[in-house]
Amino acid sequence: MPDALDAFNALPPAEAERDLLTCCASRAFAARIASLRPYADLNALLDAADAAVRELSRDDVLEALKAHPRIGERPDGDGREAAWSRREQSGVEDGLRAELAAGNRAYEDRFGHVYLVCATGLTGAELLAKLRDRLGNDERAERGAVRRELAAIARLRLSRLMEEGG
């Protein structure tokens, strides 16, 4: 991983930002993380990502959310982000897709954007339970939940980016 981090640190800004957008699809996030290079180690990179997500404006968060498929839907495409999303949602059983689709519609009607959750390691039933639970949130609580989930996904994907070598 040190070699991958060194390579990431050495990338031209535009290339670093392109890679970072696969981890969090906010241009502000990608620009911020790229501008803070070099990182001494993975933990420094992940800490910077956490801080960057906390500092995103509401519009920046909404920009990032647009890149995420609905839970239970398999994204098409051969790109890194689509492949990671399919891997992250691998615990969704086919029998729950209709219930997740209904929950997604209810969530989007209530909050105006896609339901975001760090799906890695969760079953479809767990994802559905979290969705139903979060439907009870007020706007403020849900904005906090979205930001926490976005940060968790960014951390996971940054770690994968370093494991895969960019």
Image (cartoon, helix red, strand yellow):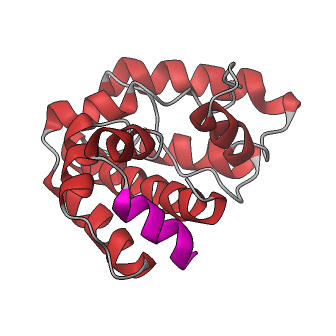
Q: Position of residue 117 (x, y in %)?
A: 51, 47
Return the residue nearer the eye: 139 or 37: 37
Q: Quadrant of residue 92?
A: top right
For residue 57, above or below residue 112: below
Q: Position of residue 95 (x, y in %)?
A: 87, 30
Return the residue nearer the eye: 101 or 34: 34
**Is 9 contained in the magenta span?**
yes
Q: Position of residue 93 (x, y in %)?
A: 85, 38
For residue 89, above or below residue 69: below
Q: Which range is magenta? A: 1-10
- Looking at the image, residue 19 sits to the left or right of residue 17; the answer is right
Return the residue nearer the eye: 27 or 6: 6
- Looking at the image, residue 85 sits to the left or right of residue 154; the answer is right
Q: How many marks?
A: 0
Please give the name of the residue rendered at 31% of the width and 47% of the height, measured from the top-left corner.
12
Please give the name of the residue rendered at 31% of the width and 21% of the height, measured from the top-left corner.
112
Return the residue nearer the eye: 165 or 77: 165
Q: Position of residue 28 (x, y in %)?
A: 19, 41
Quadrant containing the N terminus is: bottom right
Please give the name of the residue rendered at 27% of the width and 30% of the height, measured from the top-left corner.
62
For residue 74, above or below residue 1: above
**Is 32 contained in the magenta span?**
no
Please give the name of the residue rendered at 66% of the width and 55% of the height, measured from the top-left corner.
120
Q: Dominant secondary structure of the magenta stretch?
A: helix
For residue 65, above or below residue 7: above
